[in-house]
Amino acid sequence: EVQLLESGGGLVQPGGSLRLSCVVSGFTFSAYFMTWVRQAPGRGLEWVSAISLSSGTTYYADSVMGRFTISRDNSKNTLYLHLDSLRVEDTAVYYCARNLELFDYWGQGTLVTVSS
Amino acid sequence: QAVLTQPSSLSASPGASASLTCTLRSGINVASYRISWYQQKPGSPPQYLLSFKSDSDKQQGSGVPSRFSASKDASANTGILLISGLQSEDEADYYCMIWHSGAVVFGGGTKLTVL
């Protein structure tokens, strides 16, 4: 059974940092692109970032470019998202998802709240 | 103008069919894109339904009933999610998505009400 489990969310002040993790099981992690998608409260889905199989290529939405960093550790079946210089508008549930052109499996999400 | 435009809401009756549209911005040709569709119910993560590029290049999500299908209307530059035999459990938000110019783009979502 494919499973994705995010963690690392929480309350942080504007300008602060967080690192999100997504541990996967049930498939060969190193064989798939991986993606982060977020959803602000009451809003739609917003793509954040994606990473290639061996981390050689990364992609970012303009809204997070230069502030967020995606990475992965294939030996630990884990995807990461490092969030820096956080803003109030980064408040959202952050989901990890498998693949690139279509997201066939999603985690349950982890809530990031940016507030003073 | 947004890259992908979805109507904000749609209502339909149980047992009927519903067509949810996803219109691509002028200048972006729907024929060139794989459109994937997601269903999201309150308090839950999105779930993958299916993707469609052409009749010969489409994929149904694992366990997704065949009453969910997709197509394109080239004349309207639009992707379509068709849900037949509507059930109360189909009431949800539906999002379309494409990979465009090195980034993923989501439509704004359609809230489907079954009543």
Image (cartoon, helix red, strand yellow):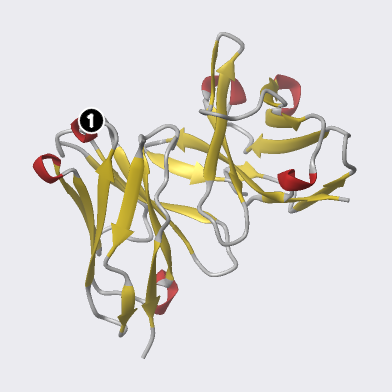
Q: Position of residue A13 (x, y in %)?
A: 30, 85
Q: Is residue A80 above or below residue B22?
A: below
Tell me the chain of label 1. A
Residue shown at the point (24%, 79%) measured from the top left? A16
| Residue furthest left in the image | A75
Most distant residue in the front direction? A1
Mark count: 1
> Which of A46 and B58 lies nearest the eye of the viewer?
B58
Residue A72 against residue B21 in the figure, above or below: below
Residue ID for mark 1: A28
Q: Is residue B101 left or right of residue B49?
A: left
Is A68 positioned to the left or the right of B60 in the image? left
Q: Position of residue B71 (x, y in %)?
A: 68, 22
Residue B47 percent location from the top left of the image: 53, 43
Q: Quadrant of residue B104?
A: top left
Q: Residue A31, how many percent across, how many down?
A: 23, 28
Identify which amino acid the numbered label 1 is placed on: Thr
Rendered residue at 78%/52% (across/down): B9
Q: Residue A44 lies in what quarter of the image?
A: bottom right
Relative horizontal placement of residue A81, taking residue A75 as reference (left or right): right
Q: Residue at x 56, y 8 (%)?
A: B56
Q: Quadrant location of residue A68?
A: bottom left
Under circle 1, the secondary element is: loop
- Residue at far bottom of view: A116
Q: Nearer the viewer, residue A42 or A48?
A: A42
Q: Is residue A64 above or below residue B100?
A: below
Q: Residues within 10 Å of mark 1 (few under 14, many from 20)?
A: few
Q: Out of A40 and B46, give the one closest to the viewer.
A: B46
